[in-house]
Image (cartoon, rainbow, N blue to C red):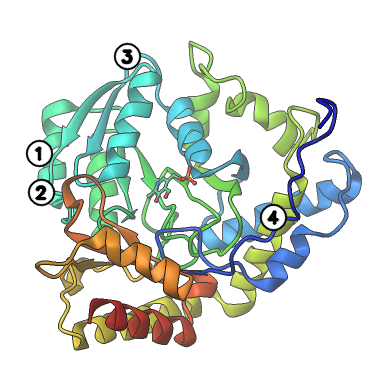
Amino acid sequence: MADTDGPTTGELTPPDRTLMGPGPSDVHPRVLRAMSTPLVGHLDPAFVEIMDEVQELLRYAFRTENEWTIPVSGTGSAAMEAAIGNVVEPGDTVLVPTNGYFGGRMASMARRAGGGVVEVEAPWGEPLDPDAVADALATHDPDVFGFIHAETSTGVRQPAVPELTAAAHDHDALVIADCVTSIGGVELRVDDWGIDVAYAGPQKCLSCPPGASPLTLSDEAMEKVLSREEEVRSWYLDLSLLEGYWGEERSYHHTAPVSNVYALREALRLVAEEGIEARWERHERIAGALKAGVEGMGLEMNAPDDYWLPSLNAVRVPDGVEDGEVCAELLDRYDLEIASGLGDLEGEIFRIGCMGHSARPENVIYVVTALGDVLE
Ligand code: PLP
């Protein structure tokens, strides 16, 4: 073979999986179709109109009136870093939780932004206790308090959010909420709950491929961002620059991922058609059937009902079972993806997603039957 011959890579034929892991979830066919429609330029007047529509649909999904509501170009971590990197200024004190993997990522990003990190502790697998948050706020007087609304590593939903935000506001701290695994699947009310900044991911309960990730900021949070003394350390994620593209001007900042924005628009249109509250209810009902199914097999959920997260079901691995082998066998024999535990819960839980287009009765029947078979 001459060295100028190209590699003889075959046509792309990925396996046809059923995605019931921690994300991505099964993508709705309408979203896939939207993604394969022809591109227009990222400054084309037709695209500018699509941008407006996406912003309006995102406000609906977040339950917010925030003008500053955009899809960040990149995965959920890009929206997360945009939130933290803009809101946290060097020298700020940032209060973060210890009860899961993504609280740890929040701490790491806050440090890189120049913040001093302090922690409010809770074990992995439990939510934050509002009293512990109030104590930590009183002790550390942070500028920013971040928490994870839906902890994908533990299957825990943070209850009592309005209590947490009220306590933070009593101490003049801005609140950043990680809503990656809740948006479009679990009750989330950014404005009513007093959340100042929320970021999310498209690949979980919105059932959209990763690539354009929701972010919303209140006017007050944006005021802090726009009056920073030191410029944001990331050029790409600097919201004062992104304002030029997503704000009034619509001038070039970077080339938006046009196909991902199309996909997100369609995914959000599906949310609006279903109705946000009906969608939350569907996730609870379908994941409830999944929970009943695994409990019927004699398995145990890791989280009690009070803070069970319907979009991510943490199921305890039975004694004597090797979780990795079960996941591998499900993938191999059933083309079915579920995941093992991480960090403090490694080897202790299976993580079974029930998100968006994957939150359907046929998926639940499939996962319960396949899991029962593999565990036999
Ligand atoms: N936060 C939470 C709670 C997540 O579950 C994830 C991804 O799973 C992220 C942040 C990061 O998102 P991404 O992997 O899309 O960058």
Which of discs 4 and 1 lies nearer the camera? The answer is: 4
Amino acid type, residue under disc 4 in the picture: Val
Residue 347, placed above or below residue 140: below
> Closer to the N terminus: mark 4 or mark 3?
4
Is the CB of the residue bearing disc 4 within 8 angstroms of ligand 1?
no
- Quick one: which residue is furthest to the front in this view? 1
**Residue ID for mark 2:** 131
Q: Distance between the residues labelled 1 and 3?
A: 21 Å
Q: Residue 91 carries which label?
A: 3
**Residue ID for mark 4:** 54
Q: Around disc 3, counting alpha carbons within 10 Å, would you say few (fewer than 14), some (14 to 19), or many (20 or more)? A: few
> Closer to the N terminus: mark 1 or mark 3?
3
Q: Around disc 2, counting alpha carbons within 10 Å, would you say few (fewer than 14), some (14 to 19), or many (20 or more)? A: few
Amino acid type, residue under disc 2 in the picture: Asp
> Closer to the N terminus: mark 4 or mark 1?
4
**Residue ID for mark 1:** 135
Mark 1 and mark 2 in contact (Cβ < 8 Å)? yes
Q: Which is more toward the observer, 133 or 19?
A: 19
